[in-house]
Image: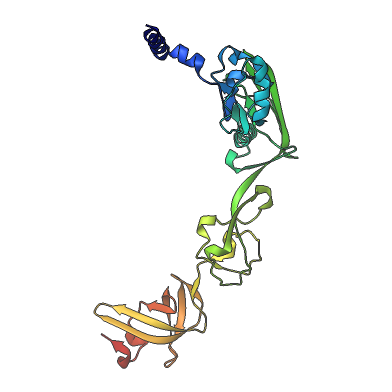
């Protein structure tokens, strides 16, 4: 009879989740996230029972993370009836404070858009902002859903200085403001060279550095587009670090003055090639003069490749019969 009654009690306890919860051993947590200003026993210990709602530590600042030695937690919960707590070999408990974080990149982008939109500074992505003080992320309570709005903004075009204040007003939170000051300048993307270029040097991709520079520094001749410089040649010497301008570049010269070149005649049914001396330098598509080294006659042709010129006139005026190849 006693065994039967005991079995009934055990079965009843097993069938009751509430009873199992009450008899479960409290266990220490290794990683905790809290949303308020205090850390409660239930945040740190599972199966804490009636003591779960008791605050015992101050939470980290919004968006920050702190650490507590496990023994300090065990000592703190003991006076609240949690004498036996399974520490599970945990030596330190990590505590995070939940927050809605507005990142630095987001803040800078908001400021750039505001300045560009109201001060005709061009595209916001082309603005370079230099702040007087370090910009840090803004951390808000997770329940604050209101967005940042501009409370005040000024910009001086002469000094390029800006002064902008954000605010956020929420019915459940006090009014807060964040002020940012510094300079803003419009920039352009340019290609500069990492090695000195002599006239005629072809620009390779390894020679080019893409960077942004203040637009006010780049007066006069147009700056070459970074995507267009590779494969072109320097029209004149270019120093290291100089921004490449359109006037600095040209198509690479495929024929050099006084160079021996191959002349090519192409007429229906006939292809004639012979050797000549270039009297001009030229890039692909340029018209240059070429002299026959034997007859000393001079014709004009179009540069069609390295050391190659194509002549459009009939070959009989320039070549001998034995130069003809069919």
Q: Position of residue 147 (x, y in %)?
A: 59, 23
Q: Is residue 266 left or right of residue 306?
A: left
Between 241 and 67, the residue placed more toward the observer is: 67
Q: Can residue 230 be seen by looking at this rendering?
A: yes
Coloration mode: rainbow
Q: Does 233 sit above or below residue 310?
A: above
Q: Residue furthest left?
A: 269
Image check: 222 left or right of 178?
A: left
The quadrant holding residue 124 is top right
Q: Residue at x 51, y 58 (%)?
A: 228
Q: What quarter of the picture does the C terminus occupy?
A: bottom left
- The residue at 60%/30% (across/down) is 102
Question: Going by the image, does 251 lie left or right of 122?
Answer: left
The picture places residue 5, in percent across and down from the top left corner, at 39, 7
Asked whether 94 or 100 is in front, the reply is 94
Query: Looking at the picture, how far across and down is residue 95, in whole percent?
Result: 62, 28
Q: Residue at x 57, y 60 (%)?
A: 246
Residue drawn at (61%, 72%) of the image: 198
Q: Quadrant of the N terminus?
A: top left
Vertically, is 301 above or below 21? below
Q: Residue furthest front?
A: 1
Please say whether residue 98 is visible from this viewpoint.
Answer: no
- In this view, the residue in front, 217 or 309, is 217
Horizontal side of residue 299 vs 147, given as left or right: left
Vertical relation: 172 (above or below) 304: above
Question: Where is residue 207 shown, x and y percent of the image?
Answer: 57, 64
Up-down relation of residue 109 to residue 274 (above or below): above
């Amino acid at each position: 009879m006693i065994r039967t009654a005991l079995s009934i009690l055990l079965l009843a306890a097993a069938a009751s989740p509430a009873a199992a919860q009450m008899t479960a051993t409290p266990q220490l947590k290794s990683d905790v996230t809290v949303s308020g200003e205090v850390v409660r026993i239930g945040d740190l210990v599972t199966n804490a029972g009636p003591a779960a709602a008791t605050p015992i530590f101050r939470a980290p600042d919004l968006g920050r993370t702190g650490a507590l030695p496990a023994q300090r937690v065990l000592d703190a919960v003991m006076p609240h009836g949690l004498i036996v707590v399974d520490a599970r070999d945990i030596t330190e408990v990590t505590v995070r404070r939940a927050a809605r974080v507005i990142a630095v990149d987001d803040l800078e982008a908001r400021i750039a858009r505001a300045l560009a939109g109201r001060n005709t500074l061009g595209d916001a992505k082309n603005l370079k902002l230099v702040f007087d003080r370090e910009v840090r992320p803004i951390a808000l309570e997770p329940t604050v859903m209101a967005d940042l709005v501009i409370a005040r903004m000024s910009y001086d075009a002469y000094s390029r200085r800006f002064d902008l204040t954000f605010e956020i007003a929420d019915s459940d939170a006090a009014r807060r403001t964040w002020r940012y000051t510094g300079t803003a300048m419009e920039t352009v993307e340019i290609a500069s060279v990492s090695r000195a270029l002599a006239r005629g040097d072809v620009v390779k991709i390894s020679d080019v550095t893409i960077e942004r520079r203040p637009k006010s520094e780049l007066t006069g001749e147009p700056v070459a587009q970074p995507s267009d410089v590779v494969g072109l040649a320097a029209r004149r010497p270019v120093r290291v670090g100089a921004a490449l301008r359109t006037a600095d570049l040209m198509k690479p010269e495929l024929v050099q003055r006084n160079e021996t070149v191959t002349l090519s005649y192409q007429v229906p049914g006939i292809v004639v090639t012979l050797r000549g001396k270039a009297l001009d330098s030229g890039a692909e598509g340029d018209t240059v003069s070429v002299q026959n080294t034997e007859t000393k006659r001079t014709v004009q042709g179009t540069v069609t490749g390295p050391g190659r010129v194509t002549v459009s006139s009939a070959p009989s005026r320039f070549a001998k019969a034995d130069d003809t190849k069919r």
